[in-house]
């Protein structure tokens, strides 16, 4: 089965934008999984979604990829 990784963004009741997240969409167009609030950096999330799509990431690895991404974001040298 082919999956597509997309960026998601929510807005609060006041219209403020919240950080970006990602979702997996199956061939049938239904959302398979979603992780909101990953990062406030749209460009980084966009690149991550593009990478997941290019590598045809299986959904079983989605949470691991997000955890690795967040760990790399919080690394202090």
Image (cartoon, grey):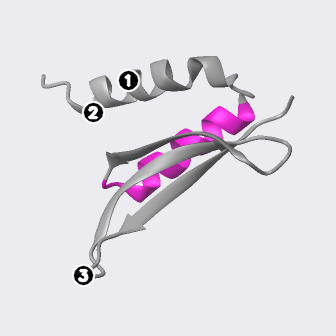
Instruction: Give the secondary structure at mark 2.
Output: helix
> Height in image: 74 above or below 47?
above
Q: CA distance from mark 1 to mark 3?
A: 30 Å
Question: Tag on residue 14?
Answer: 3
Residue 55, picture quadrant: top right
* Residue 28 left/right relative to 60: right
The mark lying in front, picked from 2 and 1, is: 1
* Residue 49 left/right relative to 58: left
Q: CA distance from mark 2 to mark 3?
A: 28 Å
Which mark is first along the chain, 3 or 1?
A: 3
Q: Position of residue 5 (x, y in %)?
A: 65, 43
Instruction: Give the secondary structure at mark 1.
Output: helix
The mark lying in front, picked from 2 and 3, is: 3
The mark lying in front, picked from 1 and 3, is: 3
Identify the magenta region: 40-54
Q: Majority secondary structure of the magenta segment?
A: helix
**For the point 70% across and 38% down, which residue is it?**
53
> Height in image: 19 above or below 56?
below
* Residue 58 left/right relative to 41: right
Label 1 close to label 3 by CB (< 8 Å): no
Q: Which residue is mark 1?
A: 67
Is 76 magenta? The answer is no
Which mark is first along the chain, 3 or 2?
A: 3
Residue 43, picture quadrant: bottom left
């Amino acid at each position: 089965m082919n999956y597509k990784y997309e960026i998601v963004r929510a807005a609060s009741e006041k219209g403020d934008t919240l950080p970006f997240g990602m979702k997996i969409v199956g061939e049938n167009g239904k959302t398979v999984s979603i992780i909101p609030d990953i990062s406030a950096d749209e460009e980084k999330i966009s690149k991550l979604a593009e990478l997941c799509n290019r590598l045809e990431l299986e959904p079983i690895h989605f949470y691991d990829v997000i955890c690795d991404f967040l760990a790399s974001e919080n690394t202090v040298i």
